[in-house]
């Protein structure tokens, strides 16, 4: 096999690799498009199902519309109160943990300063003794 044949084979190999890479890219794009379509359809179905369920619940409820609206208002208010309480609790925990972290960092900083100062003083003392 001579040099020109080897170059020609290398060129063919490069072309085949390029073609294979393009096929893989197309395959990945199709897979991604299918996943997006599936996700979109799932979300659309869930939304439609939720709306249909809520409408059926309101239409088929054994109580009057006024009573149903009162219950919805009451549940909404309870949910909002629960969310506010949890957010407040989370805020308090963040504040508490932040203050503990700050205190620990300050203590660490003080210890580091003391160690550096001590080390500098020791080196200065050693330097004086050598002279």
Image: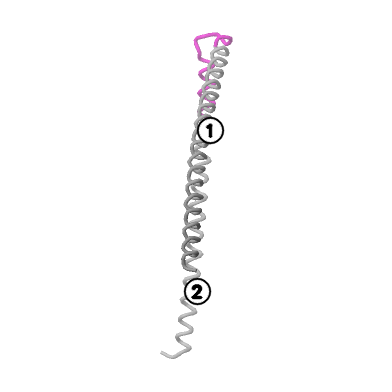
Mainly helix, strand or loop, the magenta region? Answer: helix
Sequence-earlier tag: 2 or 1? 2
**Residue 111 drawn at (x, y percent):** 47, 47
Query: Answer yes or no: do the residues labelled 2 and 1 have beta carbons within 8 Å?
Result: no
Residue 69: name its quadrant: top right
Which region is colored magenta?
46-67
> Label 2 belongs to which residue?
15
Q: Secondary structure under badge 1?
A: helix
**Residue 129 drawn at (x, y percent):** 47, 65
Instruction: Name the colour scheme.
Output: one colour
Q: Residue furthest left?
A: 1
Separation of marks 2 and 1 at Cα, in angstroms: 61 Å
Where 128 sits versus 65, above or below? below
Q: Residue at x 50, y 32 (%)?
A: 96
Whether residue 61 appears in magenta in the rendering, the answer is yes
**Of discs 2 and 1, which sits in the foreground?**
1
| Mark 2: few/some/many CA within 10 Å (<14, 14-19, 20+) | few
Q: Residue at x 49, y 10 (%)?
A: 62
Where 111 sits versus 94, above or below? below
Q: Nearer the viewer, residue 31 or 71?
A: 71
Whether residue 79 appears in magenta in the rendering, the answer is no
Quarter of the image for the N terminus: give it. Answer: bottom left
> Label 1 belongs to which residue?
95
Q: Nearer the viewer, residue 103 or 18?
A: 103
Q: Secondary structure under badge 2?
A: helix
Q: Residue 77 — which label?
A: none
Q: Is residue 31 left or right of residue 66?
A: left
| Mark 1: few/some/many CA within 10 Å (<14, 14-19, 20+) | few
**Residue 4 drawn at (x, y percent):** 48, 88
**Residue 106 drawn at (x, y percent):** 52, 42
Q: Residue at x 46, y 76 (%)?
A: 13
């Amino acid at each position: 096999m001579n040099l020109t044949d080897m170059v020609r084979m290398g060129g063919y190999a490069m072309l085949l690799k390029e073609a294979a890479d393009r096929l893989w890219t197309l395959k990945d794009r199709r897979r991604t498009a299918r996943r997006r379509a599936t996700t979109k359809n799932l979300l659309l179905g869930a939304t439609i199902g939720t709306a249909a369920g809520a409408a059926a619940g309101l239409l088929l409820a054994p109580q009057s519309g006024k009573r149903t609206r009162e219950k919805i208002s009451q549940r909404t208010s309870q949910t909002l109160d629960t969310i506010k309480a949890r957010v407040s609790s989370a805020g308090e925990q963040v504040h508490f943990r932040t203050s503990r972290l700050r205190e620990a960092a300050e203590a660490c900083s003080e210890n580091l300063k003391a160690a550096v100062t001590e080390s500098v003083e020791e080196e200065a003392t050693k330097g004086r003794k050598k002279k």
